[in-house]
Image (cartoon, rainbow, N blue to C red):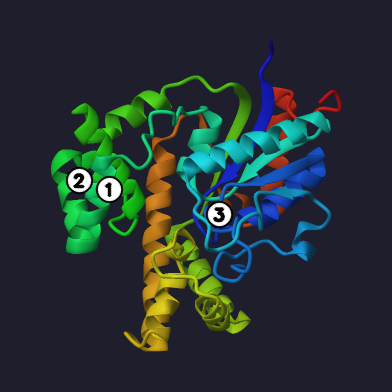
Amino acid sequence: MSKRPLIVLTGPTAVGKTALSIRLAKALDGEIISADSMQVYRGMDIGSAKVTKKEMDGVRHHLIDVLEPEEDFNVAAFQRMAKEALEEIYSRGKLPIVAGGTGFYIQALLYDIDFRDDTGEGPIRKELEKLAVEKGAEYLHSLLQQADPQSADQIHPNNIKRVVRALEYFRQTGEPFSLHNQRERERCSPYHFLYYVICSDRKNLYERIDRRVDAMMADGLVGEVQALKKRGVKRGMTSMQGLGYKEILDYLDGTCSLEEAVYVLKRDTRHFAKRQITWFRREREVRWLKLEDFGGDLDRVLQKILEDCREEGIGSPKL
């Protein structure tokens, strides 16, 4: 059986993925699956830079506004929901376009990574979670640095769930979680895919990030976080781990000024973009599209992708 077509459009935060993905979907009669760990949550629009109905321009989007902020979400849940969305899209004869910046989510979908060995709430996980509460995220991350330096370099200390999972796997199996992930990455994809990373010069990207944060503040990010706090959304919940939310929470809790919160948000977003780029450089069969090579013109970037699609037979009327 021939592999079904799929396009991935990713890149660092604020690079312009949303606008390009919508133009691409309209050109190829496609639908978009969001590969973003925060846009799944209702009521978290500004901080997640969620696409608006107007911006969608009639293009159907999946995995946006599907959970309440109190609900948990992880890569296994994303994979399951995205695969369901894929089947819906294929059944309508449309082309799926996976767009977003969460590299691990994309990898999990593209290579159908097996998460069945995730043991759930076992005693080792409970012990590690207790350690995180008692001694803090940095201490837990230092344990991972000793056991599995490669995973530690790839996982931010604040991402406690992933740190716990990596340590849990090491303690269960005696092998680094990074080795397990490497084996999973070497799987063959069940899809006929084109995988694009949109990138930009560092200076231009950082300016884009600063402008985006300023726009978020002007659009009411503080009010959005206030509303979430008022409804009882807690700092430790998955939804509040996203950039923009924890920084503004610090301001609302009185631990820093608003000016300091904005500074930290811009700084941490730049660091996040750098980690995203590092992740994508490790991925296989990736096509890099640097905006400056196209004069910053998204239409020219779009034409390049459409040329590739014609060569690969993706997005044809036969789909």
In this picture, residue 63 sits left or right of residue 177: right
Name the residue carrying label 3: 292
| Residue, disc 2 | 144
Q: Position of residue 108 (x, y in %)?
A: 49, 34
Q: Nearer the viewer, residue 29 or 313?
A: 29
**Going 69% across and 10% down the picture, which residue do you hit?**
1
The residue wearing badge 1 is: 126
User: Which of the two discs, 2 and 3, sits closer to the camera?
Assistant: 2
Residue at image coords 50%, 51%: 73
Q: Amino acid at mark 1?
A: Lys
Q: Secondary structure at mark 3?
A: helix
| Distance between mark 1 and mark 3 Cα atoms | 48 Å
Please state which of the two labelled residues, at mark 1 or mark 3, is closer to the viewer. 1
Task: Please indicate, yes or no, whether residue 299 appears anywhere in the rendered image.
Answer: yes
Query: SS class of the residue under badge 1?
Result: helix
Quarter-of-image position of residue 228:
bottom right
The picture quadrant where one finds residue 65 is bottom right
Camera-nearest label, 2 or 1: 1
Choose the circle earlier in sequence order: 1 or 3: 1
Q: Nearer the viewer, residue 132 or 17?
A: 132
Is residue 288 at all visible to an observer of this figure? no
